[in-house]
Image: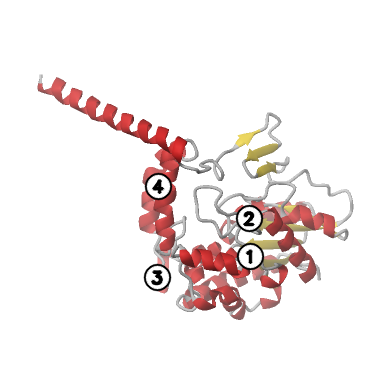
Amino acid sequence: MKHVGFAKNIILVITSLLFIFLLLEFFCRIFVDFDEGYYTSIKKEKSDKFINHPYGKIPINKHGFFDEEFNFENKKEVIAYFGDSVTYGVGAGYPYRFTEYLDTMDSKFQHINISGGLGISLKNWNEQYEMFLINNNIQRIVYMMNMNDIAPLSYNPVEEKSSDINPKNIKYIKKTIKPIDDLLRGRSTFYTYLRFLIKNELIKLGYEESGFESIELFPKKNEKNLIVASKKIDQWLNITKKKGFKSCVVILPYEMQISQDAEDYYKSINIKFEKNFVNFSTQKLIKKYLKNSDYFFIIDKAGFEEKNIGHYFVFDKGDKIDFNHPNREGHLSIAKEIFNKKVCQS
């Protein structure tokens, strides 16, 4: 009988928690002005040629890359762009990414998008990419680097003493709750909003979504880590050049670096960064320590007019503080800068 009573209590607790969750979900859907699916809502078309997101569609070609079908018969020399979520087009969609804009600006080259999708960096570069480029006689490759790529590049789990970054604890938590996160994020307004609030506090404490410290916001303090990242970039440039590629790196800005209004706003919500960060000190330090600095291009403030927050970057659209993803207007400005700087064209 004791077991029966215990089982009833467990069922009662679970039922009560479920009722509370559903009640909170109900009120959140009514009162919380929040787009829970902006970053996570994915719907493939029946043809499997496009993925539909709230910010726009993204194509998938027969090679598995997130671009339209490549036309290698037009005899134009090709420049391939490799990167993660910005290159993929989060916040912009197709055909409003820098690669599509470059195709309309530049008749000399064909600009193709070989984004690896979300969370990709130089650490994911492999022979599969190289063989695709070699087999299609593509010699020019540009790595589109986000500043949140810096921490993963500078982290060496074997030599933790060389870095103060330790994402293990946050990564363990993320791994533990992943099944629940996959089930509820973007589907439950209450869960996604709660997740958003917790994640915002982590960002204010100086952590990125990946679990790494946001060392890019404090370049002077983390100069040793930037040196390590510079060495990794040099290593990639050297390896690809030895294999016959003309390779370059473009590093992209954060919104507070190109907009005074954005800088003021993020300070007002307690996002911390060094005073000189907005003057591109992080990008300049990385370039300073590069041996291949001629192949490293900084997209700086020159390509952007002074505008309010949200003009060039995604703002207040989903379940994250986002000063990282340019919108369609931002992609256009980035494309103009790449074109004007003649990145990887010499």
Give the labeled residue for mark 3.
164
Q: Amino acid at mark 4?
A: Lys
User: Which label sits in the foreground, 1 or 3?
Assistant: 1
Residue 176: x and y, percent? 36, 45
Residue 252 got which mark? 1
For the residues bearing labels 1 and 3, Cβ distance under 8 angstroms: no
Query: How many angstroms separate mark 1 from mark 2 (CA)?
Result: 9 Å
Q: Which mark is residue 48?
A: none
Of badges 2 and 3, the one in the foreground is 2
Seen as rendered, the residue at the extreme left is 1
Q: Is residue 291 above or below residue 4?
A: below
Mark 2 vs 4, N-terminal side: 2
- Identify the image quadrant of the N terminus: top left
Given contact means CB atoms under 8 Å apart, are the residues at marks 2 and 4 in contact? no
Instruction: Identify which amino acid the numbered label 1 is placed on.
Output: Leu
Q: Which comes sooner in the sequence, label 4 or label 3?
A: 3
Q: Mark 2 or 4, which is nearer the eye?
A: 2
Q: Quadrant of the C terminus?
A: bottom right
Mark-to-mark CA distance, 4 and 3: 22 Å
Locate residue 119, reporting x and y percent: 55, 53
Q: Amino acid at mark 3?
A: Asp
Q: Report the residue marked by disc 4.
A: 175
Amino acid at circle 2: Val
Structural distance between the alpha carbons of marks 2 and 4: 24 Å
Marks 1 & 2, CB-CB < 8 Å contact = yes
The residue to which callout 2 is attached is: 86
Of 218 and 239, which appears nearest the observer?
Answer: 218
- Give the residue drawn at x 55%, y 68%: 263
Q: Position of residue 150 (x, y in %)?
A: 53, 66
Q: Secondary structure at mark 4?
A: helix
Q: Quick one: label 3, few (<14), some, or many (20+) residues within 10 Å?
A: some
